[in-house]
């Protein structure tokens, strides 16, 4: 059973929502510097390489993984230019794309999100910047916060060579600038298929704002997004 489920059940029994909110504020304050050792907004660079935009371009998709997909969904659905975020599984086969199996860490999947966005309003490079600066800690290998295992790995699933090149260039740029105190371990993998997660995982934070895991781990990320990127944030 994933730690986030165990944590949720035990905390629901022991703490009031007030206590959880106070804990979330303390947790959030200690993590607002970024996903671990990230630089501040003032020094976090824009991607030097990006995908060219045009006002007539149709909506595009990006698939990112970085820990529990609830928090990833919560961050990206608050970005201007993003029309849809779907939680799901990438990197494995259709036969085992089920939560119970993926949670065991033996299926090759990563919990991921598929982001549909308008490239005339937000670029792929801007999505990458939020991904590295806010959505997760790209220096943690096969884990993210309290969640451990390869299913919580940091990974970018590129749909084409252009996405791959832009993502690799940005990783190189961040490493060369030493934005993080540790090397970035984010994997670049071709997107074979993306499998939507079960219905109860979709839009999880909006539907479960009092869930203890959400309060402790996901809501601080959304606060961080609003504070760091007010020009990109939307309710």
Image (spheres, helix red, strand yellow):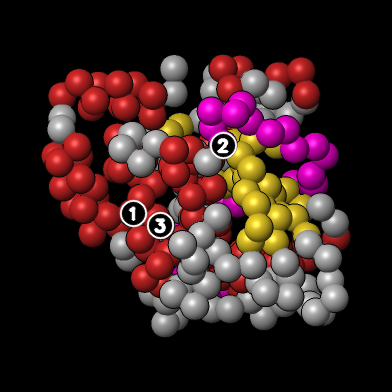
Which residue occupies the foreground of this view, 88 or 172?
88
Which residue occupies the foreground of this view, 112 or 164?
112
Above or below, 24 relative to 43: above
Report the residue marked by disc 3: 222
Above or below, 119 relative to 160: below
Query: Which residue: 73% across, 29% down?
Result: 92
- Do the numbered discs 3 and 2 sit on residues whose CB atoms are within 8 Å? no
Q: Please say whether residue 81 is one of the residues in the magenta stretch.
A: no
Which residue occupies the foreground of this view, 127 or 173?
127
- Do the numbered discs 1 and 3 sit on residues whose CB atoms are within 8 Å? yes
Name the mark on residue 190. none
Q: Measure the C-alpha gap from mark 1 to mark 3.
A: 5 Å
User: Measured from the top left, where is residue 145 in percent x and y?
Assistant: 38, 42
User: Measured from the top left, where is residue 192 in percent x and y?
Assistant: 82, 39
Report the residue marked by disc 1: 220
Q: Please say whether residue 197 is one of the residues in the magenta stretch.
A: yes
Numbered disc in front, either 2 or 1: 2
Quadrant of the frame with the N terminus:
top left
Q: Earlier in the sequence, mark 3 or mark 2?
A: 2
Numbered disc in front, either 3 or 2: 2
Q: Measure the C-alpha gap from mark 3 to mark 2.
A: 17 Å
User: Measured from the top left, where is residue 34 in percent x and y?
Assistant: 38, 62
**Residue segment shown in magenta:** 176-202
Q: Measure the C-alpha gap from mark 2 to mark 1.
A: 19 Å
Name the mark on residue 202. 2
Q: Residues within 10 Å of mark 1 (few under 14, many from 20)?
A: many
Query: Which residue: 85% across, 76% down?
Result: 56
Query: Which residue: 46% across, 62% down?
Result: 235
Query: Which residue: 80% across, 37% down?
Result: 193
């Amino acid at each position: 059973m994933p730690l986030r489920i165990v944590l949720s059940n035990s905390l629901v029994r022991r703490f009031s929502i007030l206590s959880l909110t106070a804990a979330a504020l303390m947790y959030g304050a200690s993590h607002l510097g970024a996903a671990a050792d990230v630089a501040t907004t003032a020094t976090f660079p824009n991607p030097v390489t990006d995908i060219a935009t045009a006002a007539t371009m149709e909506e595009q998709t990006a698939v990112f993984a970085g820990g529990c997909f609830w928090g990833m969904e919560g961050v990206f659905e608050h970005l201007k230019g993003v029309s849809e975020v779907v939680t799901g599984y990438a990197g494995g086969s259709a036969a085992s794309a089920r939560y119970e199996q993926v949670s065991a860490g033996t299926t090759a999947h990563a919990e991921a999100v598929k982001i549909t966005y308008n490239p005339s309003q937000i670029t792929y490079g801007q999505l990458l910047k939020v991904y590295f600066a806010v959505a997760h800690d790209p220096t943690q290998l096969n884990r993210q916060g309290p969640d451990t295992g390869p299913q919580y790995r940091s990974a970018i699933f590129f749909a084409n060579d252009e996405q791959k090149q832009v993502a690799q260039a940005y990783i190189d740029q961040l490493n060369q600038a030493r934005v993080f105190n540790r090397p970035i371990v984010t994997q670049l993998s071709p997107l074979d298929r993306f499998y939507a997660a079960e219905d109860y995982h979709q839009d999880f934070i909006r539907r479960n704002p009092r869930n203890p895991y959400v309060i402790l781990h996901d809501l601080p990320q959304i606060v961080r997004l609003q504070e760091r990127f007010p020009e990109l944030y939307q309710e």
